[in-house]
Image (tube, rainbow, N blue to C red):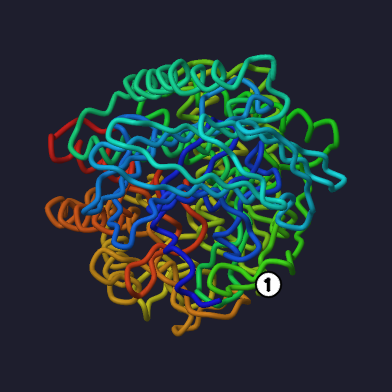
Amino acid sequence: MTSTDYQAIGNYGLIGNLHTVALVSMQGSIDFMCFTRFDSPTIFASILDTDKGGFFDIKPQLADVDYKQMYLPDTAVLLTRSLAEEGVAEITDFMPVKTTEQNCALVRSVVVTRGEIPFRMRCQPRFDYARAEHSVDGTKHEVTFTSESELVLSFRLISDVPLVIDGKDVYAEFTLAERETAHFVIESAKVDKQLSVKKALHHYTVDDFDKTLNFWKNWIGKSKYNGRWREMVSRSAITLKLLTSCEFGSMVAAPTFGLPSVIGGSRNWDYRYTWVRDAAFAMYAFIRLGFMEEAAAFMNWIGKELDTIEQHQGTLQLMYTIEGGEEMPEQILTNLEGYRQSSPVRIGNAAYDQFQLDIFGELMDSIYLYDKFHGAITWSFWQHVERQIEFVCNNWQRPDHGIWEVRGGQAEFLQSRLMCWVALDRAIKVVEHRSFPSPLERWRSVRDQIYRTIYDEFWSEEKQAFVQYRGSDVLDASALLMPLVRFIHPKEPRWLSTLEAIERELVSDSLVYRYRLDSGASDGLDGEEGTFSMCSFWYIECLSRSGQVEKARLLFDKMLGYANHLGLFAEQLGRRGQQLGNFPQAFTHLGLISAAYDLNRRLDSFPEF
């Protein structure tokens, strides 16, 4: 097996049903899918092991084929087109949006628009992260796959072309003339099987297709953003929605695990969980765009977490499972070689028990905005929040693992102090707005103490910049959040000097490193990273806010050019500009939305948000 057996991470499109997602390659292969939830084990994972992971592909049997891929406008319905001298064909992939994950289905329709083309379909599932055997049973047009592991799971594949069982797998060979179609549907075995295959296929490919199109068009139609870059902003919003659980209201940081930040390296994490930080920032983006239902659902989710914390007399964790579980023990999947031999492949995330102070600020900022624009913060909810603010008052000076979740030891990070200041500042604003009986004088005193500490003790005269942690001379792109959270004015001399220092050491055109390991930073891990796309969007927004609007606009347009062919971003970009890390990443897309919103407003001379 060679690295050429793997598609580039950026060569995938995303489809989903608000419970889980699937990644569809430009060549029409579904190479990743957790069934039936974001955090369920995979049934297809060839993106992590082309031999063992499992896949579901439909390919024209032609020697010379070009491929193109697009979304139907304003939807999460994906079209993959194959083009050859012999003809042109299209595969339409979507997942019907359902209220419960038990109704999970994936629909694939093939049509030839020109010529006559032979196809081969292969469905090769591998249950439980390719660790479990399975049985296959079925008829000519309906096959059921059943896992033989302790985690009993089954799904059925139905089609209007003959299916052939081949050991543990299923294939079909068929030829379509112009305007002829073939349909394939994977559905949870819990779905009502009383419908005939013919009726079930009609239901999925006609009724559910129309409902799915209308769902996405109606949803994005509620967006209040009508400015420049509307298409990219809408695609980012749809991506964030695809990563949000309609059952729980929580959002995963990314829908994948194990995709490497460094090819061949060990920086391979599981992002299928809800980071309070990422979800809170995403709610900020949703609120800006006018999607209040999503913001309300997240507030309901976080309210339940705070209530549970109250019962256990604990404090907020940095991350949870999508349903609110507190433990995500890390395991290594030794049976999978990893994307292009990037190992180990991990599920779970040991960072869940790290101490991170910044999460309180990000959460409090989203609560503040929700209260300001939705008006639904209650006293009972606020009492839970108040206890977390008291925790910040008593613990803000403690070292922690920071926003980047370093595994090389704790430190007194600037960004953690900054977000503690945000937590208190926004809490004070909520109390003043709602007239809640909270200890304002104490909170103001601590807030001001944090401000003075950051201003005086995290400043380097040598660097003429605010530094990563107290006493260091290391620069960190998370300092770009300082003007974005209104800690410092974007035109204040100390900030402009910091921005210039970041540009010298961390910025390459529109690309931004979060820190440079060759400049003294340490995170306890091996391997040099790529640039962080969300940091690029922070940098662009900082330029916009500092008055460098034309420069910000140029770099924003250039940054959009690094998106994949569908407008999707992973966490990082490699030396060749390739997408690296889990894909797509929520944090990157919400950073894009924020930068587009601010830059568009300033170009139009809109008032301050």
Residue 458 in sight in this render: yes
On screen, residue 494 versus residue 145, left or right, reads left
* Residue 140 relative to residue 312: left or right: left
**The N terminus sits in image quarter:** bottom right
Would you identify the image quadrant in which residue 413 lies? bottom right
At label 1, the amino acid type is Gly
Q: Is residue 431 left or right of residue 209?
A: right
In this rendering, position of residue 378 left or right of residue 190 = left
- Vertical position of residue 230 compared to residue 197: above or below: below
How far across and how far down the image is residue 179, in percent?
29, 30
Say which quadrant the C terminus sits in.
Answer: top left
At which x and y percent is residue 441?
A: 59, 35
Q: Relative to the observer, which residue lies in front, 152 or 541?
A: 152
Q: Nearer the viewer, residue 135 or 305?
A: 135
Which residue bears the numbered disc 1? 409
- Residue 531 x/y as whole percent: 39, 68
In the image, what residue occupies the spot 58% across and 75% down?
Answer: 341
Q: For the residue labelled by badge 1, is the local secondary structure a helix, a strand or a loop?
A: loop
Residue shown at the point (64%, 63%) measured from the top left: 401
Label 1 neighbour load within 10 Å: few <14, some 14-19, many 20+: few
Q: Is residue 265 above or below residue 455?
A: below
Residue 13: give x, y in percent of width and height: 41, 47
Q: Residue at x 49, y 35 (%)?
A: 242
